[in-house]
Every structure is written in structure tokens, then in C-alpha cells.
Image (cartoon, rainbow, N blue to C red):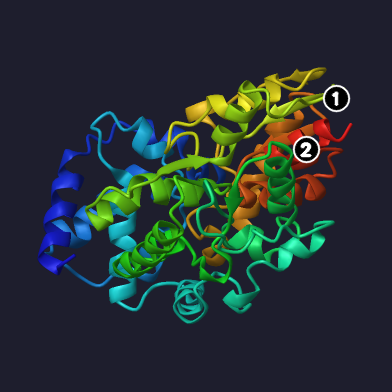
């Protein structure tokens, strides 16, 4: 985006804002910090002062901090009475932060990792399938099997972070039990690129989109499934627009595929006795509209008592783990997560289920910090538990 285009878009968006405050009440950052300057409408007003009236200017350290104190959860966009695409505005402001050299060091480190290793970790991308060592037997078709019906896009967090590695282990076992033809991209799977959007490096996303899409096409698979909420959002909503073409294959989230397999009778769970609540990941529920499939899976497991949280579905409260907030302000991210886990505890559930690796890691850490007797797991893990009973 050129500087002129950036300022033009910013002026248009900031002038539309009527300062009604709808966004403020839904913003997890504002609800934690409590200062008006942390609210979305105040950030818009500050942007107006800095750019619209002055024709561009230097971002102060205080305003730079406020720009990065955001989980990019989309609650403000959903609440906006003027229908302003606030997530796009925050992304543009972060791009300007990078251009002015005001972005947090964590942004630079993250972008550097992605460019050098093609993933968000410090590990070589060639080790993407190391999680499969936890399987009793590694399927010979797991790594780039041509002609497989489904490509399972594992995602960086599940590939490289030990706790989340149990999610692809569960997914592989479920797909095998359902006798589904599937494979992965193995070492050819690159990060979906979503972290670049939150780090103000959106211009680099096209390289990742082109590579990943081409690799799936080369295998000739009809469906791509991802267990990560943000990966799903990028594949289904951003890649087609960014590349300007139809991907040529179906994109589904793991919960959608598992719900289909349950409905088809290919997975038949046994009874579990527990009270369960479900946390909607922002990029899956609010930003992608997938709220029914995870609940269909839970409802399909006999014996479970399902108890909704006070905020759920598209109104679900963020876990604090999005928008690269951990890199910019770990304390704030953890505080948001602790508030959410207390909301989960209020349901009297013993198990908190989600469908996003990042959400699960944040909530599990928060449960420990709050000393709550809550087990946090992925929907796939819960379903596998019912099948192994």
C-alpha cells in the first residue's frame, strides 16, 4: 500500500467513526486496561489527529504501544455501527509502524523467522513432522502422498510446540479410524503467513500463499483441512483474494470434517461422563462464521453435559493469544486469558474444549495461574478420547 493510499483510507475510516462506543464495550484490551486511549474509537481518533489532519507524521511511543495492544479478535469490527473494517485499519497502522521503525522487536524477530525458516519457531522447517514420532505407527503416506483425497495442513504451533503436538497426533488417529485418504505437506508446508498480517508485514504474505497453494495442487487433492483457526481463515478468506484465483480445492476446518465423519457414521464415539464448555476461537467463530461444527461434535458424544459460557459463538470473548499480543505485551495477553478462563470456570465444567492450538495454550496456562481444576483440550482430542473408551 502506498503512503497516499494509506492516508486516504485512514482519513475515510476515521471520519466515518461516530464515536458511539459500541466497540469499546466489546474490546478485550479496553476491558482489561480501562483507559479510553486503549479503546478502538480512541485509536481511530488518535490516527485522525496524527494522519488525517497533519497529512502524516511520526507515531509516538505511546500511540505505537496502543496500536500493538490488540488481539485482532474482530470484536470491534463486529460491534461497529458504521461498519468500519477495523481489523484492516489496525493492520494498516501496524504496517506504518514497521515503516517508521516503531514496531516491537518481537515483530522483527517473528518476520525474520518466517523469512529464514518458513515457520514461527526456531526449528528448521525440515522437522515439521517430528510430532508424528508420538504415533504408535507413522503412516507411510503421511508425507506428501500424491493423489490423497485430503491434505492436512498442520500449522506451525502444532508442528513445533510440544503441548500442541498432541492435536495432529489425535487428528491422524481419527482420520485413520474413519479410513480417510489423507496426507500432509511435510517439510513443504510453510507457515500460512497469518502472523505477518499482525506484524505489519502483509506485503510478504503472497509468497507463502503461492507456495502453499501450489504444493497442494501438485498433490492433486480435493480437500485441504486445517486444525488451526487462523490458518483456516487465511486459506479460506485471504488466499483466494490475494492470489486473485480460485484455489481449485475445498478448504475446511478440522471441526467441519470431523462433524461430517460423525454424521456419516465413520466415527462412532462411546459415552463420556463430564461437563464440557467450548471456547470459540476468534478467527474460527466470529471471523469465519464456524460455530456449529464444534458443538455438533460435542453433542455427538453420548453422556457429555454441555454448558455454554456467558459469551459464546460470534460474541465469544478472546483468549488473549491473537494479534501477536504476546510478543508486544505478554502480561496483558495473560490477563485477558485469565479473565476468559474464569468465565469458563463459571459454567461448572471440568473440561474446556476449543478448536485452536493457540487458544488452548493460553487457556491452559491461565487455568494453572488461576489454580482452577480445569482440563483444556482440543475438540479432536476429546473425540479421540470418546473413541478409545
User: At numbered mark 1, what does the secondary structure look like: helix, strand or loop?
Assistant: loop
Q: Which residue is rendered at x = 51% and y = 69% of the image? A: 188
Query: Any mark on residue 384, and which?
Result: 2
Residue 313's x, y, as percent?
53, 27
**What is the x, y in percent for residue 49?**
20, 56
Residue furthest out toward the front: 147
Viewer-side label of 1, 2: 2
Mark 2 Cα-neighbour bin, 10 Å: few <14, some 14–19, many ≥20: many
Helix, strand or loop for disc 2: helix
Where residue 176 appears, as percent x and y from the top left, is: 71, 44
The N terminus lies in quadrant: bottom left
Give the left or right position of residue 305, taking residue 310 as reference. right
Q: Name above or below for residue 56 compared with residue 172.
A: below
Which residue bears the numbered disc 1?
Answer: 272
Kindly tell me whether residue 96 is visible in this rendering: yes
64 over 25 or under it: above or below? below
Q: Nearer the viewer, residue 349 or 117?
A: 117
Q: Nearer the viewer, residue 34 or 310?
A: 310
Amino acid at each position: 500500500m502506498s503512503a497516499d493510499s494509506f492516508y486516504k483510507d485512514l482519513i475515510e475510516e476515521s471520519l466515518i467513526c461516530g464515536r458511539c462506543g459500541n466497540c469499546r464495550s466489546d474490546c478485550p484490551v479496553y476491558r482489561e486496561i480501562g483507559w479510553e486511549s486503549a479503546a478502538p474509537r480512541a485509536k481511530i481518533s488518535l490516527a485522525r489527529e496524527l494522519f488525517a489532519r497533519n497529512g502524516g507524521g511520526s507515531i509516538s511511543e505511546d500511540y505505537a504501544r496502543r496500536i500493538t495492544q490488540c488481539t485482532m479478535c474482530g470484536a470491534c469490527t463486529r460491534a461497529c455501527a458504521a461498519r468500519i473494517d477495523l481489523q484492516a485499519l489496525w493492520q494498516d497502522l501496524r504496517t506504518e509502524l514497521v515503516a517508521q521503525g516503531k514496531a516491537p522487536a518481537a515483530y522483527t524477530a517473528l518476520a525474520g523467522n518466517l523469512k529464514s525458516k518458513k515457520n514461527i519457531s526456531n526449528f528448521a522447517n525440515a522437522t515439521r513432522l517430528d510430532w508424528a514420532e508420538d504415533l504408535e505407527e507413522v503412516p507411510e503416506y503421511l508425507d506428501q502422498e500424491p493423489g490423497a483425497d485430503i491434505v492436512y495442513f498442520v500449522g506451525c504451533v502444532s508442528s513445533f510446540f510440544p503441548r500442541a503436538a498432541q492435536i495432529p497426533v489425535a487428528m491422524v488417529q481419527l482420520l485413520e479410524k474413519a479410513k480417510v485418504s489423507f496426507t500432509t505437506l511435510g517439510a513443504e508446508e510453510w507457515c500460512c503467513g497469518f502472523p505477518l498480517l499482525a506484524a505489519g508485514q502483509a506485503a510478504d504474505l503472497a509468497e507463502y500463499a503461492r507456495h502453499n497453494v501450489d504444493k497442494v495442487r501438485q498433490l492433486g487433492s480435493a480437500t485441504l483441512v486445517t486444525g488451526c483457526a487462523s490458518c483456516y481463515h487465511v486459506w479460506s478468506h485471504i488466499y483466494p483474494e490475494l492470489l486473485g484465483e480460485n484455489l481449485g480445492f475445498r478448504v475446511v476446518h478440522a471441526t467441519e470434517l470431523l462433524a461430517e465423519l460423525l454424521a456419516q457414521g465413520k466415527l462412532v464415539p462411546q459415552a463420556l461422563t463430564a461437563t464440557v464448555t467450548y471456547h470459540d476461537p476468534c478467527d474460527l467463530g466470529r471471523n469465519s462464521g464456524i460455530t456449529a461444527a464444534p458443538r455438533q461434535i460435542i453433542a455427538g458424544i453420548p453422556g457429555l453435559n454441555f454448558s455454554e459460557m456467558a459469551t459464546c459463538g460470534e460474541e465469544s470473548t478472546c483468549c488473549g493469544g491473537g494479534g501477536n499480543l504476546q510478543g508486544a505485551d505478554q502480561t496483558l495477553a495473560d490477563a485477558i486469558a485469565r479473565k476468559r478462563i474464569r468465565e469458563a470456570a463459571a459454567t461448572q465444567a471440568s473440561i474446556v474444549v476449543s478448536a485452536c492450538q493457540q487458544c488452548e495454550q493460553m487457556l491452559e496456562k491461565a487455568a494453572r495461574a488461576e489454580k482452577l481444576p480445569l482440563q483444556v483440550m482440543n475438540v479432536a482430542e476429546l473425540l479421540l478420547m470418546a473413541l478409545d473408551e
